[in-house]
Amino acid sequence: MKNGWRLADAYHVRIVEMLPGEKRPHRLAHFHDYVRLYRKSAGSFSDSTVHDTVQLRGGAQVSRLENVVHHRSMRGTFEQIEKFNAYSSDLARDMVARKRRFSYLRLVFEMPMSFLKAYLFRMYFLRGSTGFIVSMNYAIFRHLRIAKHLELKKAAESARD
């Protein structure tokens, strides 16, 4: 306790996405709120190889930091494609390990629906040609993770036969 207030056990941090070439985040930029600062006694990272989420113990007092993190996850298309290719492979392996199931219809609709999610709902259409390119790459990434998952699952089934 310091000056009548108690420090929280964990803090949410707003992470605002920045696209290549942006000097500051677009005012309607997509963002996530994540717990990124916490006491070890209040929580820990989950046991996932691909999702870095903090699992807080019951009763943990959570507060929010005022400032935001400007997230520059890619410098350009080349880097984004490499990252999405590696990440889709990791996700596919994780989904197989967790015995996730997808229909082949998901393979058909994943790409167009993901493009619409990024371009319209995340409002990348407001960010010009870069927004369009990032939306298309995101849709391809989402498609690849399902396609790779189905391929790994099929290979595992063939190995058992």
Image (spheres, rainbow, N blue to C red):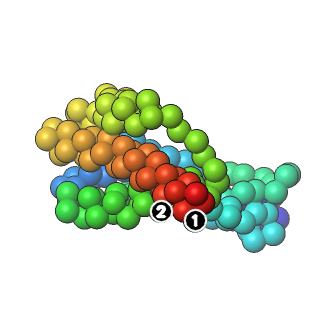
Which x, y percent locates residue 61?
78, 53
Whether residue 15 is visible here, answered yes or no, is no
Whether residue 86 is visible here, answered yes or no, is yes
Along the line of sight, which residue is nearer the eye, 119 or 126?
119
104 sits left or right of 53 in the view: left
| Disc ID at residue 90 | 2
Along the line of sight, which residue is nearer the eye, 105 or 6?
105
Which x, y percent locates residue 123?
31, 32
Q: Are marks 1 and 2 in contact (CB under 8 Å)?
A: yes
- Mark 2 residue crowding within 10 angstroms, few (<14) / some (14–19) / many (20+): some
Query: Which amino acid lies under the numbered mark 1 shown in the image of this protein?
Result: Thr
Query: Which amino acid lies under the numbered mark 2 shown in the image of this protein?
Result: Asp
157 sits left or right of 148 in the view: right
Q: Quadrant of residue 107?
A: top left
The residue where tag 1 is placed is 49
Which x, y percent locates residue 111?
33, 36
Q: Secondary structure at mark 2?
A: helix
| Disc ID at residue 33 | none
Label 1 or label 2, whichever lies nearer to me, is: 2
Which x, y percent locates residue 46?
68, 61
